[in-house]
Amino acid sequence: MAESDSSAQRASSAVWRYGLAVSSVAVALIVTYLLRPDKLIAAVFFLAIILSAWIGGFGPGLVAAVLTTLAMVYFFLPPTFSLRFDPSEIPHLIVFFVSAFFVSSWSAARSRAETSLRRARDEMEAKVQERTSDLRQSNEQLQAEIAQRKSAQEVLQKQAVELRDQAQLLELAHDAILVRDLSSAIMFWNRGAERMYGWTREEALGEITHTLLQTEFPRSFEEVEAKLRAEAYWEGELIHTTRDGSRIVVASRQVLDRDQHGNPIAILEINNDITERKRAEEALREKAGLLDLTHDTVFVRDMSDRISYWNRGAEELYGWKQKEAIGQVSHQLMQTKFPAPLKAINQELLGTGRWEGELVHTKRDGTQVRVASRWSLQRDEQGRPAAILETNNDITERKRAEEALQKAQAELAHVIRLTTLGELTASIAHEVNQPLAAIVTNSNACLRWLAGEPPNLDKTRQAIGRIIKDGNRASEIISRIRALVKNAPPRKDWVDVNEIIVEVIGLALNEADRNRIFLKSHLSSDLPLVLADRVQLQQVILNLIINGVEAMGRITEGSRELVVSSENNEANDLLVAVRDTGVGLEPANLNQLFDAFFTTKPNGMGMGLAISRSIIEAHGGRLWAIANSPQGAIFQFTLPTNDKSIS
């Protein structure tokens, strides 16, 4: 199909070119025949030949030359309108035909040359355009590469500045810091590494780290590298050999660095010399090994509280085997409950080298145990804290026994209070009866004043006010008695001792009057508050007053005076004294006066003074007795004070 189309195009072109030759000769003939330009006949026909050859090519030009020759013979040479001509015209015709032939050839050649030049020029322009487009594209690519390289250079410069700043910071570190590439060749070596290992930076750069330092790994090098590549971090202990041949143990932390595309590029390694710490831990383990026969728990932990030694006593008490406990954080493993913040305990340990106290631990089976714990700080040769030796003694049963004893003492103290109050039954009844009688009297008076004509409202109002006052007084007396009778657990509050003395004197005043004893008080007005259990102090003071009343009840001559006083002594403690003028104290009985079940009274139990002393000592004070002059006894006790004063 394509060949037939091409043939048709060539045929059409040939018809057009040869038709042009015929047409141009015809036009030239018409022009010369009509106008008769005798001198321009040849020139006109030459123009037709040149036009045919120029446009149509050599073939149409040759046809035009033949046709013009025939036209001149037929129309212009005699005889006209005949192809016969005078033989003498043959040279002219030959010259004309040859000239026409050469003109046709020349025109065709010029046309072909011009066409070739035009085609060559077009091809050249196309190539130039193509090359120009390529150059433009190359230039654009070059400009983009230049911009990209400029941006990359700026990034590199910024990274270089950051790396320089980071390197300056790394130079200040005491730890050995080095950077190695993926083949373990050293790329960076700080001053800490120079001091630790002995090689200068120039000597270390480019060396293989594990070859230079003769590294000994806890596992194979391949396992360490595999974990580092997988997790981008590795931490552990390594053994290195320094330039002078000594072996050191380092705590190593290694981080894998990646580029912006996530490809690994280098490894940052930070090594801290822990040789002295390891020696100290080993020494502690050796010492602790000697304690493996003890029943106490002994273990060693580093400064991050990780257990490095665990003796048999610890295994038996807590339930974890040594291999299970080693490496664990002690306070997390045993869920330690501290008596104070751990930060404060560690500060005391670092300051004094020791700490003692009670801790609560949770064993493997979930039960809790209370231990008396003693910590000892171990330092290395440079005096730096290296490890802690902790010894714990199980006091769980002892604490339970102490709690049971305290409970029994509290019960006994409650019984003593009830007994004491039983002895004061008449006094208490009188104390309560007074405000009740006053209430009845004032109530009757109110009825009389209201029944008057007119009612005396002012007097009634005053009487009602006295009723309210007496009712409150009776309520306060009953409240104090209930507090003494109630078996409540001890509770320490900031209390005013003078106020407690006044309350107790109010309870014992009627008993003193019944025994014809003058009871008075000398109380200092500037006493500080004390931290104490109010009911227990009431019990102690009441017991001492009743003892003094009973002691003076047995004498028949002399004054009967009981004085309760309070003041600050020379040690700035609060001093309370109960002075009586009774039978006094036997010197032989002073040493056992406060012993349990010892009594000088015919019907006494011998527990009042013993319990009173235990109460005062539990408050941090002291209770003792001395002889009074000229007769009687003085029972006095002290309580520690703080800066809280009575306003």
Image: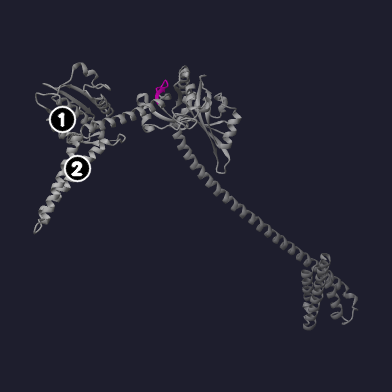
In the rendered image, the quadrant that contains the C terminus is top left
What SS does tag 1 mark?
A: strand
- Dot 1: few (<14), some (14–19), or many (≥20) neighbours within 10 Å? some
Quadrant for residue 44, please give it: bottom right
Above or below, 21 against 633 in this view is below
Q: Nearer the viewer, residue 197 or 207?
A: 197
- The residue carrying mark 1 is 565
- In three-dimensional space, the C-alpha distance between marks 2 and 1, rounded to whole angstroms, equals 26 Å
Q: Let me know if residue 126 is in the magenta part.
A: no
Residue 619 percent location from the top left of the image: 27, 29
Q: Tag 2's secondary structure?
A: helix
Residue 376: horizontal and vertical position, in percent? Answer: 40, 23
Q: Quadrant of the N terminus?
A: bottom right
Nearer mark to the viewer, of 2 and 1 = 2
Q: Is residue 493 visible?
A: no
Specify whether 212 is left or right of 506: right
Magenta residues span: 372-383
Label 2: which residue? 474
Inspect this view and state whether residue 394 appears: yes
Q: To which quarter of the image does residue 230 belong? A: top right
Residue at the image point whose x is 83% and y is 65% from the top? 3
**Mark 2: few/some/many CA within 10 Å (<14, 14-19, 20+):** some
If you read the primary sequence from the N terminus, does the residue marked by circle 2 or circle 1 appear first?
A: 2
Identify the image quadrant of residue 608.
top left
Q: Residue at x 55, y 43 (%)?
A: 260
Colour scheme in the image? one colour
Q: Position of residue 187 (x, y in %)?
A: 53, 32
The amino acid at mark 2 is Ala
- Decide if residue 67 is on the left or right side of residue 234: right
Q: Residue at x 33, y 29 (%)?
A: 408
Q: Does residue 497 appear to the left or right of 321 in the view shown?
A: left
